[in-house]
């Protein structure tokens, strides 16, 4: 599956990358990313996740060909 990250998450991950692990849910993806970059785990806890540009909850089932966006909170000014 393809993972896309935004904003401050790009300090920890490439802006988009392939994830080959056999993961079942968005929660699994989140846990895997936190395991790969422990310093990003607090930020990952604040993120929303989207599959093919639609927001989903952590229990959402994922598939090999999914494109998953990891979107941290943002603020305007």
Image (cartoon, rainbow, N blue to C red):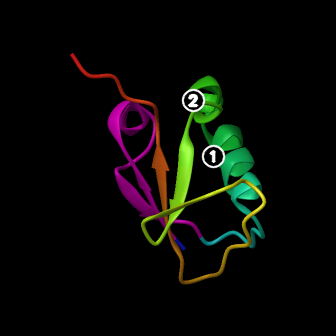
Residue at 74 percent across and 46 percent down: it is 31
Expressed as whole percent of the image width and height from the top left, the position of residue 46 reads: 59, 30
Quarter occupied by the C terminus: top left
Looking at the image, is mark 2 or mark 1 earlier in the sequence?
A: 1
Q: Quadrant of residue 62?
A: bottom right
Kindly identify the residue that appears in the image at 75 percent across and 73 percent down: 22
Locate residue 47 relative to residue 26 in the image: left or right.
left
Does the stretch in magenta take in 72?
Answer: no
Residue closest to the eye, 49 or 55: 55
For mark 1, does the 10 Å Cα neighbourhood hold few (<14), some (14 to 19), or many (20 or more) residues? some
- The structure residue drawn at horizontal position 33% and vertical position 22%, both measured from the top left corner, is 75
Helix or strand or loop: what does disc 1 sit on?
helix
Checking the image for residue 40, the label placed there is: 2
Q: How many numbered circles are shown?
A: 2
Magenta range: 2-19
**Classed neighbour count for the residue bearing mark 2: other residues with Cα under 10 Å, few (<14), some (14–19), many (≥20):** some
Which one is in front, 52 or 18? 52
Mark linked to residue 50: none
Where disc 2 sits, the SS reads: helix
* Extreme residue in the top direction: 77
Q: CA distance from mark 2 to mark 1?
A: 8 Å
Identify the residue at image location x=60%, y=35%. 44
Discs 2, 1 touching: Cβ within 8 Å: yes
Q: Would residue 22 appear left or right of 49 to someone viewing this image?
A: right
Query: What residue did someone put label 1 on?
Result: 33
Residue 66, given in percent of the width and then of the height, sits at: 54, 77
- Does 65 sit above or below residue 7? below
Q: Which image quadrant: the N terminus?
A: bottom right
Q: Name the residue nearer the viewer: 69 or 17.
A: 69
Residue 18 highlighted magenta (yes or no): yes
Instruction: Give above or below for 32 relative to 9.
Output: below
- Residue 51 x %, y %: 53, 67
């Amino acid at each position: 599956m393809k993972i896309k990250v935004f904003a401050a998450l790009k300090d920890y991950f490439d802006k988009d990358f392939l994830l080959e692990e056999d993961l079942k849910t968005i929660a699994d993806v989140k846990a895997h990313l936190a395991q790969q970059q422990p310093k990003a785990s607090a930020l990952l806890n604040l993120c929303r996740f989207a599959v093919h540009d639609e927001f989903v909850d952590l229990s959402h089932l994922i598939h090999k060909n999914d494109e998953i966006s990891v979107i941290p909170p943002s603020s305007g000014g």
